Image (cartoon, rainbow, N blue to C red):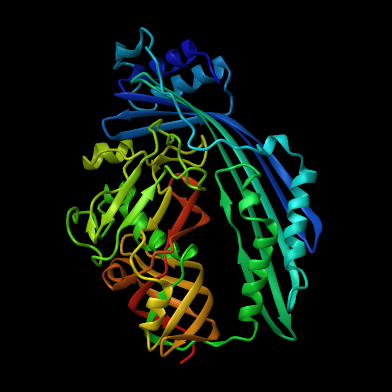
Amino acid sequence: MLDQNLVSEVLGAARAGGADFSELFVEDTLSTTLRLHQGQVKEAGGGNLFGAGLRLLYGDKVVYAYTNDVTADGLRQLADAVAQARGGTGMTDRSGAGGLDFRRLEVKPLYQARQHPLSHGKREKLALMQRAHGAAAGVGDVKTVDVNYLDRIQKVLIANSEGLWAEDERVWTRLMVSAIAQDGTLRERGYYGPGAGKGLEFFEEKTPEAIGAEAARIANAMLRAEYAPAGKLPVVIGNEFGGVIFHEACGHILETTAVEKNASVFADRMGQAIASSCVSAIDDGTIAGAWGMVNVDDEGMPGQRTVLIENGVLKSFMVDRVGELKTGYKRTGSGRRQNYTFAPASRMRSTYIDRGDKTPDDLIKSVSHGIYARTMGGGSVTPGTGDYNFAVNEAYLIENGEVTRPLKGASLVGNGARDLMNIVGVAGDLTLGQGMCGSVSGSLPTDVGQPHLLISEITVGGRA
């Protein structure tokens, strides 16, 4: 993407103020977004994001600046500006002034798109969306359908004053369907939005018809549901997007972004039991074609599979370069950022609770009176403590070991750290769900996931 001599000059000039380390991140991203409402095109957008960010480290202190002028003069001006941002240019460090011996990192893609989004026009993508619309519209009591499509192709170059040179291309594709079922004044919404780090071949394994039908199924199932009971109850949480609770209430406080500030209840618990012995949790950037796949992270480190919790014991945090400097824990390939306007930070990739030895039926049959939270919605979490409140999109009552009536208006109120200790059963049907995760370095594609699992007691918000 850039000449090596120019990159070497910029990294050296940036360190003229005495920085210990300099890093250049260059990005060229193309994106397409489309929206159908009731089968009609309402929005068609996209664009090209092209720019560079320059990061300096003085010990564990960070200076970061960025520009969309990626000419030689633009990058030189950026280097001068960032060098003077801390103490002027009087503390010259010559170690990088003679040029850098870049060592090109051979990035072996975990997955290569067979139907690259750039090789398909909007007409073909709209046809996929129409298939999803057709599978949801008019099914049961569905009256309104929205379909959104996204693809994003991000090419990056990461080079640093240690001689690292890494280039990568990331491809993401996603289809999201929202269906509203209505009967008189009763209205319920069903939503399903899978995606992958793949091209349009993703829709061969997850067809648009299946995505639309799933959104319609949820909306119809919930349309005439009763209000959920309130109180402390055993809860079976479904697989796939059920993992959002672990992601929000536990995952973020396992990132060194929180640990380094001592803003995590797990900060001083390494090697200790923090979960039930039936719980193991993973953050994995190496799942080929996953929405959270990372060939290399945004600091140029190959993605890794990181065991966070093993049989209940805390084994690792998710660590970026600054996190390593501040905590002493080794980097895990977890440095990520939304784009060049953000400095990298420790972030999740595909984060999930691992398979157990039960079946979903085993878990449900063990509950005499409780809730089956089949699909989860959004919620809120208190940073640091892990206290959370999540809506349940699709819930059912469990009576005497059987799933009986659909319930609406249910929410789960709990604490991530406490609930980890209260997981009493984990099934073997691990599935990942896709979403966008927002934090200090922007909004990123991440997978959440888990098998079905049983928590012995959670406060359920509903109507008593």
Displayed quadrant of residue 309: bottom left
**Most foreground residue, 346 or 200:** 200
Residue 359 screen position, x and y as percent:
40, 71
The answer to whether any part of residue 266 appears in the image is yes
Above/below status of 33 relative to 264: above
Q: Residue at x 41, y 86 (%)?
A: 401
Residue occupying the far top of the picture: 98
Say whether residue 84 is visible: no
Q: State the image coordinates of residue 449 (x, y, percent, origin top left).
A: 44, 59
Query: Which residue is at the front of the view, 35 or 74?
Result: 35
Task: Judge whether 23 appears above or below 396 on screen.
Answer: above
Expressed as whole percent of the image width and height from the top left, the position of residue 242 reads: 46, 66
Q: Residue furthest right?
A: 40
Identify the residue at horizontal 43%, vertical 34% (top origin): 296
Q: Quadrant of the N terminus?
A: top right
The image shows residue 232, relative to residue 246, as above or below, that is below
Q: How many marks?
A: 0
Would you say 12 lies left or right of 194 here? Answer: left
Q: Is residue 307 left or right of residue 404?
A: left
Q: Nearer the viewer, residue 137 or 11?
A: 137
Name the residue located 45 percent from the left edge and 39 percent from the top edge. Answer: 294
